[in-house]
Amino acid sequence: MKNINSSQKQTVVAGAGSGGMTMALLLAMAGKKVVLVDIQPEIGGFMRRFTRDGVYFDTGFHFTGGFENILAQMLQVMNIDDLVREAPFRSKLYLAESSKHLSLPQTGVDDLAEYLAQEYPADRDAIMRYYQCEKAVIANTPMFDLRDQNFQEKLQLTNYDTTTLAELFSELKISRETATVLGSAALCHGTPPCESSVTHHCRVSYGLGNHISRIERGGDSFIDAFLREAQKYDIRIITGTKIIKTSKPDSTGRCANVLLSNGEEIEVEDVYLSMHPESIFELMPQEVLSSSFLRRVQRMEDSCSFFSIFGVLDNDLPFGSELTSYLSVNNLDDILLPQRSGTGTGIVLADEPDSHGNMRKTLTAFRTMYAEETAKWEKLPRRANNQEYQDFKTRSTESIIDEIFRAYPEFKGKFKLSASSTPLTCKDYDPPTGCAYGVRRKIGVSRLFGRLPVQNFYAIGHSALVPGVLGTMMASFLLFRQNVGEKIYRNLIAERLGKCEHNRFG
């Protein structure tokens, strides 16, 4: 390959979702010359919002945990906390089998545990033991405090990593409905209890149970804040482009150049890949691919995708921003396994300005669904003209609206549909698979995170710690810390967070 950027080796970050943007900014802060590349025409991935008739809708980023601790720290270090601001939000459950509504307290997991113990008094002891597990997992999870100097020790496996959530529920001898309630956060990581480790589930469940939030202006605020900081650090952003080839690895196993689909060749210091493992595998030169790495990638299975509907509600309806998790059956495996028989639907209500500054009440509902359910239409050149596919969309939309009206009967006659999307829409938007949470974090299947077979290539990782925006940001901070070294990392954290009384660096 011809090197056309010989003045200084560059660090390439491929994939400009939350993980890629975070990694690009951290590396630039550390003095690297950074190029951020994304296949989409705009950066942001599923954080980007879209509009219908001037109303904003979230594409894939609806809420998050972490504003009470780790997320606030990361935003402060990145200097974007002034634009990425928390908005009030609350969480509810609707259990269709018993028509039971649960309004979950937002004052921490201790209050949540007590609330559920009062709702299910026969399971009080089991509920308390479960939340003890959550606290133990969080105490031993790296990077929930950016100043924690013991993160390497916390990367070691524990019994919670080798026990499934279903096995824990069995050990606790709790009722089926209570197990469904305690495991309901599985809808936010996409791995069913029979496959998910206690560790993986509890990281998600604790974060959302302890403090759940929306962000003002959704993911757009994060993107705008990143673009402001990227300009300060001269991060070069190339969209509509991807890496299509690497140079042959040298004797140390490093690749010196990458070729982009726009024809540009870049001499690289390091390359960080924030993308699906399937896309990462395709980039690896044949010379470095071992049979063990091949088996590792082949064992990975995608999490669910979503069928989503978007609409507006009458402004006279009295509600604030909230999430209701609708569970059709009290068995999360029946909802989250590919051969599912139940449905799990997240219903997000929001109240925010439209493009003209007028307050609008919006509803977004997303039902877990696997790509296999739409595979027969994948190769159609024009799906919009296929009646069978359109009938499937109509049936699914009507079914989700029926669930909405069961959970919110007051919405009947006051909801107007604006748009819908299927797993194929997600795949078109975010190739190669469009899955919601990356690969399923099945117990015994290793994650793809950190150094790759090419010695200067790194995977930021799908759900390396936790899924979603919070998880990919945490993974970027962790990988950044490992690669730049403790001195640079600690100096950055001390500079941005200050040496307060809680500073664990001493």
Image (cartoon, rainbow, N blue to C red):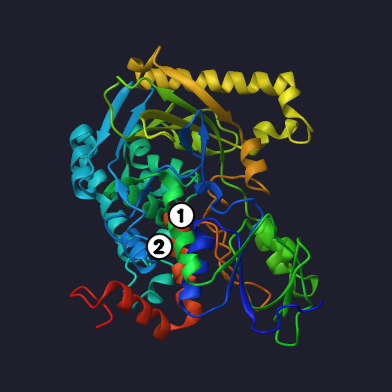
Q: Give residue 200's position: percent from left, percent from top.
A: 43, 55
Q: Residues within 10 Å of mark 2 (few under 14, many from 20)?
A: few
Residue 306 in the figure: left or right of residue 63: right
**Mark 1: which amino acid?**
Asp
**Residue 405, picture quadrant:** top left
Which numbered disc, 2 or 1, marks the residue closer to the eye?
Answer: 1
At 78% across and 36% down in the image, what residue appears? 379
User: Which mark is first along the chain, 1 or 2?
Assistant: 2
Callout 1 secondary element: helix
Examine the rendering and report whether any part of residue 148 can be seen.
no
**Mark 2: which amino acid?**
Asn
Question: Quarter holding the C terminus?
Answer: bottom left
Question: Quarter holding the N terminus?
Answer: bottom right
Q: Give residue 82's position: percent from left, percent from top.
A: 32, 58
**Residue 391, picture quadrant:** top right
The answer to whether 475 is drawn above or below residue 202 in the figure is: below
Q: Which residue is mark 2?
A: 159
Number of numbered discs present?
2
